[in-house]
Image: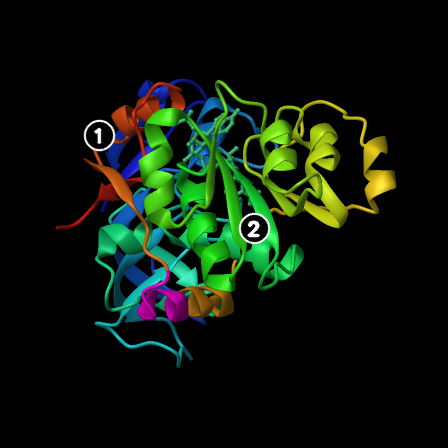
Amino acid sequence: MKALLLKSFGGPESFELSEVPTPVPQAGQVLVRVHATSINPLDFQVRRGDYPDLVQLPTITGHDVSGVVEAVGPGGTSFAPGDEVWYTPQIFDGPGSYAEYHVAHESIVARKPASLSHLEAASLTLVGGTAWEALVVRAALRVGESILIHGGAGGVGHVAIQMAKAIGARVFTTVREANFEFAKSLGADVMIDYEKEDYVDVIMRETAGRGVDVVFDTIGGNTLSRSPDALAQLGRVVSIVDIAQPQNVVQAWGKNASYHFVFTRQNRGKLDELSALIERGQLRPHVGAVYSLADIPLAHARLESRDNGLQGKIAISVAP
Ligand SMILES: NC(=O)c1ccc[n+]([C@@H]2O[C@H](COP(=O)([O-])OP(=O)(O)OC[C@H]3O[C@@H](n4cnc5c(N)ncnc54)[C@H](OP(=O)(O)O)[C@@H]3O)[C@@H](O)[C@H]2O)c1
C-alpha cells in the first residue's frame, strides 16, 4: 500500500510517499481501507520532533480515519467487510492514518454517521472526541451556563461551539474579525476579536461582571493564569494545550475554580454520542480545504502558518 512515511524529524519535506506492506488484522482488530484522513496540529508536532521519546522513526502519523472495513481479524464480532467506519487511531501506539490501509482494535472503531461524507467524518474524529471529552466529560457544561471557547474558527473550536449550543449554553468565542460570520453561523452568541479586544473586558461587560462558567483553552499562551479573571464563581477551565511555561493560577482561589487537562483518549462510545448530535442536525464539521495523500506536506505547511485563511479542518482524500 501507499503510505506517507516520516523518516526523520523536520519540516514538511521530511515525508516520503512510499510503498509499504499492507497490515494484517490480528485478533480483535479490523483492517480498514482509508478513504479520508485529516490534518491536526498533533501531526506537525510529531513531524517536527516535539515527542522524540514517544515516536519511533520511521513512522506513519495521522490521527483520523474514515473508511470501509476490508477484513476482520480472528474473533472479531463488531464489524463485517463493507461496513463504513470512523475513528482516531491510538495516539503514540502504532501506525497512523496517512496510508491507504490501517488496522485498529475494534473497541476504538465506530460506525460512520451515514449523513457525513468520508471527508467530513475524517475531519471530526479527533477534534470531536476532544471537544466531547472537554465539554461534556470534564467541564460537565450544563443548560443555561456560559462558556468561552478560544480559537472558535479552528478544528477543535468550531466543533466545540456547535456542541456547547447543543447543550444549551451561551457561547463566547475568540476569533479574528474575518471569522465572525463563520463563528456566528456555528451558533456563537458573542464573537471577540482577539486581535483588537481583551476577552476578559468583553466577558465582564457582557455578563455584568459575573464571568463565564467555563473557559475552554485551545490556544495556550497565558490562558491558564488569565482565565480566573473571566470566570464566574465555581468556574471550570479545561485546557487541551501542552503547557510549555509554568503559570501562576493563584487568582483561581478566589473563584473556587477548577482546572482540567485533557489528552484525548480513544473509545467507540464518544464517537457514537457525536453521531447522535450529527443525526439530530446539531453538529457538522466544516471542511475548509481538501488535499491528496501525496500533498500532505503542503497541507502541513498551510496549517502551520498562522495566516492560512483556514476555517474548520483540512481533510485529506486518500481513496476517492
Ligand atoms: N489534548 C488533546 O487531546 C488535543 C486534541 C486536539 C487538539 N489539541 C491541541 O489544541 C490546539 C488546537 O487544535 P486545533 O485542531 O483546533 O488547531 P487549528 O485547527 O490550527 O485551530 C487553532 C485555532 O486557534 C486560533 N488562534 C490562534 N491563536 C489565537 C488566539 N490568541 N486567540 C484566539 N484564537 C487563536 C487560530 O485562529 P487564526 O486562524 O485566527 O490564527 C485557529 O483558528 C493545538 O495546540 C492542538 O495540538 C489537543
Residue at disc 1, secondary structure:
loop
In the image, is residue 137 above or below residue 210? Answer: below
The answer to whether residue 65 shows anywhere in this view is yes
Amino acid type of disc 2?
Thr
In the image, is residue 115 above or below residue 226? Answer: below
In the image, is residue 140 above or below residue 247? Answer: below
- Sort mark 1 into few (<14), some (14-19) or many (20+) by Cα contacts within 10 Å: some
The answer to whether residue 241 shows anywhere in this view is no
Left or right of residue 50, residue 160 in this image = left
Does the segment drawn in magenta span residue 128? no
Q: Nearer the viewer, residue 48 or 206?
A: 206
Confirm or reject: label 2 Cβ below 8 Å from ligand 1: yes
Q: Position of residue 309 (x, y in %)?
A: 29, 25
N-terminal-most mark, 1 or 2: 2
Q: CA distance from mark 1 to mark 2?
A: 27 Å
Q: Residue at x 58, y 55 (%)?
A: 135
Instruction: Give the labeled residue for mark 2.
Output: 264
Q: Residue at x 66, y 41 (%)?
A: 208
Q: Residue at x 21, y 72 (%)?
A: 82
Instruction: Give the labeled residue for mark 1.
Output: 295
Q: Nearer the viewer, residue 23 or 203?
A: 203
Q: Residue at x 27, y 52 (%)?
A: 120
Q: Position of residue 263 (x, y in %)?
A: 60, 46
Q: Position of residue 69 (x, y in %)?
A: 27, 67
Q: For the magenta stretch, what is the residue range? A: 275-282
Q: Nearer the viewer, residue 123 or 185?
A: 185
